[in-house]
Amino acid sequence: MRKALVITKGYLLSILIIVALIWAPSVLAQYSSDSYSIDEYFFGSGGTIESTSASYSMRASVGDIGVGNAIADAFQLYAGYTTTDDEYLEMVVTPATVNLGLVTPTTTVTGEATFYVRTYLASGYAVTTFSETPANGDYNIANLATPTASSAGDEQFGINLVVNTDPESFGADPMQDPDNSFSFGYAATDYDTADLYTYNNGDTIAASDSSSGTTIYTIAYMMNIDDLTPGGIYTMTHTLIATSTF
């Protein structure tokens, strides 16, 4: 028979760690032969990719015929004399630690953590979570396998990446920086609905379908316990992995 225990200390420590940035090999759109190489092909009146001295460094262009991004099933290009051919994927997590505080069978605890992702010359990216739910020794809080509302008194752990009003106002929708003309990241399916929380180890929680400027994401954490949840301090090392194909 299990004895009912009321948690007297229930601090959830969630540490978000970037474990890896993984990308596929790419083919650069360069022109070269045994006798010459051209870093980037240019149609226009003129310009310089790199002009430097001891006092300055400059890139300049005159009379660009076209600028901006063009995407098709077989290619992607950025027009403009000073565009770079160096692909990249970047993810930064701040802050590193989230303390959810004291939880009891009659209360719900919540918390937030933010990260941002951007990528260039890519077919998009995906951010995947690779962690178990908060644990106290060998006991893990039950995860919400499908999007579910918070219910105090039921053991639950879940997250989403949008703004919520229940059980309180917390979280935030993905924010495009500088705006949605340049950034295209979004919260993944099941993690994109206000006031519904879910968590499955291995799920994609955020993504973009193309190269994207900075998208700032807020992870909204929600946790409840029941009368039989063992008392103690619960911790979670939250591992996020961003992957992209170039």
Image (cartoon, helix red, strand yellow):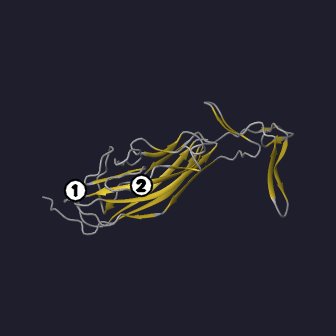
In this view, 130 is above or below 77: below
Q: Quadrant of the C terminus?
A: top right
- Precedes in sequence: disc 2 or disc 1: 1
- The type of residue carrying mark 1 is Gly
Query: What is the number of the mark on residue 213?
Result: none
* Left or right: residue 202 compared with residue 228: right
Residue closer to the observer: 91 or 175:
175
Residue at the spot 62% in from the left edge and 31% down from the top edge: 72
Secondary structure at numbered mark 1: loop
Q: Dot 1: within a 10 Å radius of its alpha carbon, few (fewer than 14), some, or many (20 or more) residues?
A: some
**Where in the figure is residue 196, as x and y percent of width and height?**
34, 47
Number of callouts: 2
In this view, 222 is above or below 246: below
Cα distance in 3D space between marks 2 and 1: 22 Å
**Where in the figure is residue 18, as x and y percent of width and height?**
51, 56
Residue that carries the numbered disc 2 in the rendered image? 171
**Where in the figure is residue 233, as x and y percent of width and height?**
31, 67
* Left or right: residue 28 compared with residue 220: right
Q: Residue furthest bottom?
A: 8
Proximity of marks 2 and 1: CB atoms separated by less than 8 Å: no
* Left or right: residue 136 compared with residue 245: left
- The type of residue carrying mark 2 is Gly
Q: Dot 2: within a 10 Å radius of its alpha carbon, few (fewer than 14), some, or many (20 or more) residues?
A: many
Residue that carries the numbered disc 1 in the rendered image? 153
Residue 238: quadrant of the picture: bottom left
Q: Nearer the viewer, mark 2 or mark 1?
A: 2
